[in-house]
Amino acid sequence: MTGVFAVLGGLVLAGCAAGPPASRPVPRAVTPTAPLSPSPAPARSRGAAAPPEGPEQTDVYAADRPGMLSPVVKGFRSLVYVPNSESGTVDVIDPETYRIVRHFTVGALPQHVVPSWDLKTLWVNNNRGNFLTPIDPRTGRPGRPVPVDDPYNLYFSPDGAYALVMAERNNRLDLRDPHSMRRLRSLPLPCRGVNHGDFTADGSVFLASCEFSGDLVVVDWRTPRLIRRVHLGHMSMPQDVKLSPDGRVFYVADMERHGVWLVDAATYEVVRFMPTGRGAHGLYASRDSRHLYVSNRGEGSVSVVSFAQRKVVDVWRIPGGGSPDMGGVSADGTKLWLSGRYHGVVYVFDTRTGRVLRTIPVGAGPHGLCVYPQPGRYSLGHTGVFR
């Protein structure tokens, strides 16, 4: 959820009390495309898992294993970038020492730090400030801001041709040049608060959540055009979206229903709902593609979901409670970094034990932190969705 918590919290909940009537589904008409090969495959380190072979072993996260860093990022220093929404700042943390090594001011309401498709730039989404701040990941230093209207969140098309700006308050998906950020096309959406999404396994379709109207929208981004709107209900507040490793199901966190929706990635029909914890918010795949980490912001916990079993198999709790929000998995897969949205901290979980290793004080309202670099050939955006 965006915004100034004390003021906007009540308005957001009031706005979600009743959503618009569901629209009639539009027939799906998507032409499958050949697999995309946007960049050279990264070298695989000794001991790293080999990518699965054959259609029956599809794993969309096969290039995200430990050690599989792209040649583009191999010289980058490992750092954690924390946008503090209420402070208008970014804190940069050394993951080895857990100390803040850099702090700088950006713009009004920075929401997420997003790796570019080509892995060469990090973009701070200054939502209310209406611009993006580039960060050079070789140095961790910010560059000159780029004017962009309403950049709540940022994604990239799988072929690298477009930056997809989630213009949340404008209820629009803006397609921009991925380097200059010049707007090329816009797609108005029949929902309120578009903010998170993910792509189908073949990259042809983008499924996005609309937080304030309880909807999902299915978009052919190449045209662009709306394929379908899926209404989850007036009591829903959908958040992060993540595709299963086999490409068959989208997982959609729902902060008001306190769990995760499973949505068929071919028909876009809701399969079922899975309770996880109060305020389910962020979704992250483990480095071995076996588990999905769900941050439950309202109760200070992380639910561990088995992709194979499609059920919760463990729950990690923050001692004394907390507000785990957005973040990412370390490059080696041993740690999960999450911002503590309402507590002005960052949590570091040990993914082997579920124990909180560190609680690091940062600015006010930390949100979409980015662990960088991470394994993968290219970035689809958000705080680090790699293929």
Image (tube, rainbow, N blue to C red):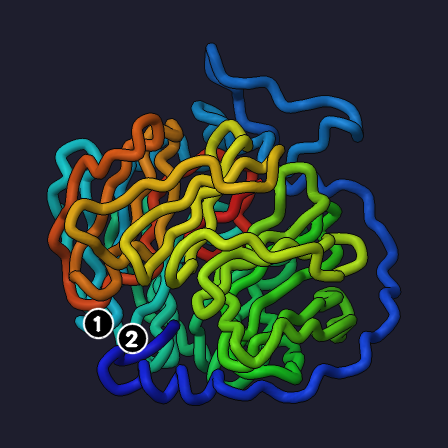
Kind of residue sitting beneath label 2: Leu
Dot 2 lies on which element? loop
The quadrant in which residue 151 appears is: bottom left
The quarter of the picture where residue 325 lies is bottom left
Q: Total of numbered circles in the picture?
A: 2
Q: Residues within 10 Å of mark 2 (few under 14, many from 20)?
A: many
The reply to whether residue 181 is visible in this rendering is no
**Do residues under tags 2 and 1 come within 8 Å of each other at their CB atoms?**
yes
Q: Does 295 sit left or right of 245 as displayed?
A: left
Look at the picture and state if 349 lies above or below 232: above
Residue 178 in the image, given as x and y percentages of width and height: 54, 62
SS assignment at label 1 = loop
Tell me which amino acid carries mark 1: Gly
Name the spot of residue 2 as percent of width and height, x first: 36, 75
**Of the residues under marks 2 and 1, which one precedes in the sequence?**
1
Residue at point 76%, 72% (across, down): 228
Which is more toward the observer, 253 or 93? 253
Q: Is residue 372 left or right of residue 164?
A: left
Q: Which mark is residue 109?
A: 2
* Distance CA(mark 2)–CA(mark 1): 6 Å
**Label 1 Cα neighbours within 10 Å, binned few <14 / some 14-19 / many ≥20:** many
Looking at the image, can residue 312 be seen? yes
Image point 42% across, 59% down: which residue?
A: 281
Residue 153 to residue 290: above or below: below
> What x and y, as percent, mark residue 145?
33, 70
Residue drawn at x 67%, y 23% is 52
Of 178 and 217, nearer the camera is 217
**Front one among 179 and 375:** 375
The residue that label 1 is drawn on is 88
